[in-house]
Amino acid sequence: MTGGVSRLDDEDYPAVTMGQAAELLEVQPAFLRSLDAAGILTPHRSGGGHRRYSRRQLATAARVRALFDEGLNLDAAVRIVALQDELNAARARIAELEGRLGTS
């Protein structure tokens, strides 16, 4: 593969415009701007200042949106997503340490 195309496999490569992201997530661009303003997502900015999102950021936005759609407010949805991420990181660390000890 050529250099630019191979980056599409990178979950953190900012390949998606705000319009594309909004369409994929079935949200208004204002929802994505609110996630940016709240510090939940920090999209890459193109040379012209346009927001670009990575696949990882889209997955986070989708998780927030799902909780938002269930009736939670934005702050609660963001907190739940952050706690889920912390729990997953802690579980991965525990598994790593157990592997080093030879236990499971």
Image (cartoon, rainbow, N blue to C red):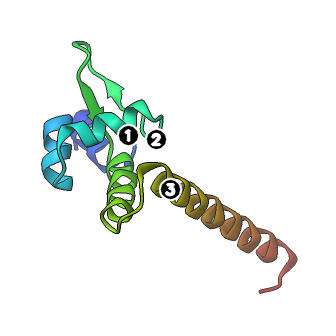
Q: How many marks do you count on the picture?
A: 3
Q: Dot 1: within a 10 Å radius of its alpha carbon, few (fewer than 14), some, or many (20 or more) residues?
A: some
Specify the quadrant of the image occupied by residue 52. top left
Position of 71 relative to 74 (above/below): below
Q: What's the residue at 42%, 54% (across, down)?
A: 73
- Report the residue marked by disc 1: 35
Q: Nearer the viewer, residue 85 or 10?
A: 85
- Report the residue marked by disc 3: 76
Quarter of the rendering occupied by the C terminus: bottom right
Specify the quadrant of the image occupied by residue 63. bottom left
Residue 41 visible here: yes
Spatial CA span between label 2 and label 1? 5 Å
Q: Position of residue 57 (x, y in %)?
A: 37, 46
Say which label, 2 or 1, has the lower sequence index: 1
Say which label, 2 or 3, has the lower sequence index: 2
Q: Amino acid at mark 1?
A: Leu
Specify the quadrant of the image occupied by residue 8. top left
Spatial CA span between label 2 and label 3? 12 Å
Tags 2 and 3 touching, CB below 8 Å: no
Quarter of the rendering occupied by the N terminus: top left
Q: Amino acid at mark 2?
A: Ile
Task: Classify residue 95 as left or right of residue 58.
Answer: right
Q: Amino acid at mark 3?
A: Ala
Tags 2 and 1 touching, CB below 8 Å: yes
Position of 6 relative to 46 (above/below): below
Q: Dot 3: within a 10 Å radius of its alpha carbon, few (fewer than 14), some, or many (20 or more) residues?
A: some
- Report the residue marked by disc 2: 40
Residue 16 visible here: no
From the viewer's perspective, is the residue at label 2 or at label 3 nearer? 3
